């Protein structure tokens, strides 16, 4: 779909389209995933890092939950890397490998040799998207965080646009859907 003015790159997709396209059926609906993340934030308020005032040097952590993404993870990571470097944004890319049985981890290890701000965490056994997001939230090092889909469906340019909007607007959080 085309990017609309209210879209942000951190979204929960319409899973019915995926189900129709290839027969995959999500274990949890987007609303359940959001509720789980909101509950985690509520339960872990003491571990969240407060930011009193946004500045121009806010380190962005891009969390990418990944399970068997050998066909897309390199494109996703390289696209983020190129865009964030070009925009001169302080960042890290954190991939949570959710016990992939394909070559996802080997691809990540190779990418890490060329992209110094990339790191990955192995998350055995597969626990699902929500758990992988929480694992990323427990391990990121930036001042703000974004969840990016591993399948290259999120445009890095959208992430930059909304990162800048967040800083300029001094917002604590930005949520959106497409």
Image (spheres, rainbow, N blue to C red):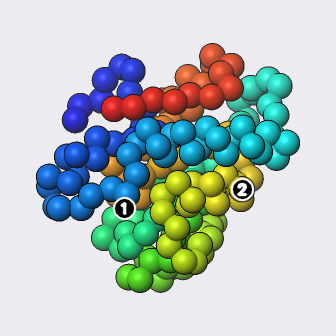
Q: Nearer the viewer, residue 57 or 122?
A: 122
Q: Secondary structure at mark 1?
A: helix
Q: Quadrant of the C terminus?
A: top left
Residue 170 percent location from the top left of the image: 68, 19
Residue at (16, 61) in percent of width and height: 22
Residue 105 percent location from the top left of the image: 49, 79
**Mark on residue 75?**
1
Q: Give the Cα separation between the discs numbered 2 and 1.
A: 25 Å
Left or right for 36, reference 26:
right
The residue labelled by disc 2 is 138
| 60 shown above or below 4 | below
Farthest residue to the top: give it.
169
Residue 155 percent location from the top left of the image: 37, 43
Residue 44 percent location from the top left of the image: 77, 45
| 82 shown above or below 58 | below
Q: Nearer the viewer, residue 158 or 100?
A: 100
């Amino acid at each position: 779909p085309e990017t609309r003015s209210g879209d942000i790159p951190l979204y929960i997709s319409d899973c019915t389209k995926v189900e129709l396209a290839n027969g995959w059926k999500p274990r949890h609906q987007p609303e359940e995933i959001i509720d789980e993340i909101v509950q985690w934030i509520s339960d872990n308020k003491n571990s969240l890092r407060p930011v009193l005032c946004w500045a121009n040097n806010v380190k962005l952590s891009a969390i990418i939950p990944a399970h068997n993404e050998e066909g897309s993870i390199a494109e996703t990571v390289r696209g983020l890397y190129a865009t964030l470097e070009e925009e001169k944004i302080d960042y890290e890319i954190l991939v949570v490998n959710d016990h992939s049985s394909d070559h996802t981890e080997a691809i990540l290890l190779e990418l890490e040799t060329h992209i110094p701000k990339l790191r990955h965490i192995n998350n055995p056994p597969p626990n699902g998207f929500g758990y992988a997001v929480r694992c990323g939230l427990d391990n990121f090092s930036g001042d703000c965080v974004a969840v990016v889909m591993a399948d290259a469906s999120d445009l890095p340019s959208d992430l930059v646009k909304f990162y800048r909007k967040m800083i300029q607007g001094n917002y604590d959080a930005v949520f959106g859907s497409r």
